[in-house]
Amino acid sequence: MPPPTPSEYEQQLVAQRDYLMRFARLQLRNDAWAEDAVSETLLAALSKPQAFEARSQLKTWLVGILKHKIIDSLRQRQREVVLDNGTDDEASDPLEHMAFKADGHFAEKPADWGNPERDMQSRQFFDVLEACTDKLPPVQGRLFLMREWLEMSSEEICKELAMTPTNLYVQLHRARLRLRDCLELNWFAAR
């Protein structure tokens, strides 16, 4: 397949902008910062189109660039955290609705999640996962995305946000519990 012409390449880049904006907003939780990161990503792609060797999809390549731009933005903004003034029941125990036996195992068997490998390949699943991630409290969502999507190490996150490893672990644990509940309700139970 011949490489795209410059105008086709630019059109393909523009077509990915909405997806890139959603991805950046999920992590940065700030429209202006997300816009900056996406603009820098598209400018980088435009300035070196030869770097895209079509070994992957254009979207995958652009997300790779965007991840680095997001990390740069996080470092530049140094420890700015968007706080949610809403009702976040941080003090409540996220496990209180579950029953455990004395040995620490679930008293009630968790819901059957079917075939996770097949579901992971489903675009609909990722849409639900993205919606569930977007509904996390801002601090938890940011930490979860830094760890799981941007693949930053725990040490990097703790250093970047001046938090203790214990606090990071607790916040990530709570985020994962909320994601699990959201996925069970909106994906696995809905099927």
Image: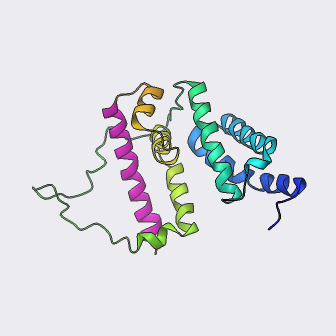
- Magenta residues, as a range? 165-191
Q: Residue at x 88, y 53 (%)?
A: 6
Q: Position of residue 45 (x, y in %)?
A: 76, 45
The quadrant in which residue 9 appears is: bottom right
* Snapshot colouring: rainbow
User: Is residue 190 among the parts visible in the rendering?
Assistant: no
Viewer-closest of 72 and 100: 72
Residue 97 is one of the magenta-drawn residues = no
Q: Residue furthest left?
A: 102
Magenta-span inclusion, residue 169? yes
For residue 176, side relative to residue 128 (left or right) = left
Across the whole image, how many numbered discs are drawn on residues? 0
Judged by its main secondary structure, the magenta piece is: helix
In front: 43, or 187?
43
Whether residue 23 is situated above or below residue 117 in the rendered picture = above
Q: Is 39 on the left or on the right of 145, as rendered? A: right
Q: Is residue 16 above or below residue 163?
A: below
Figure quadrant of the N terminus: bottom right
**Residue 106 rendering spot, x and y as whole percentages:** 20, 61
As drawn, 172 above or below 15: above
Position of residue 81 measured from the top left corner of the image (x, y, whole percent): 52, 30
Q: Where is residue 187 drawn, in percent x and y?
A: 47, 67
Q: Is residue 20 visible?
A: yes
Q: Quadrant of residue 75?
A: top right
Residue in the image at 33% along x and 72% along y: 112
Residue 55: quadrant of the picture: bottom right
Q: Nearer the viewer, residue 12 or 125?
A: 12
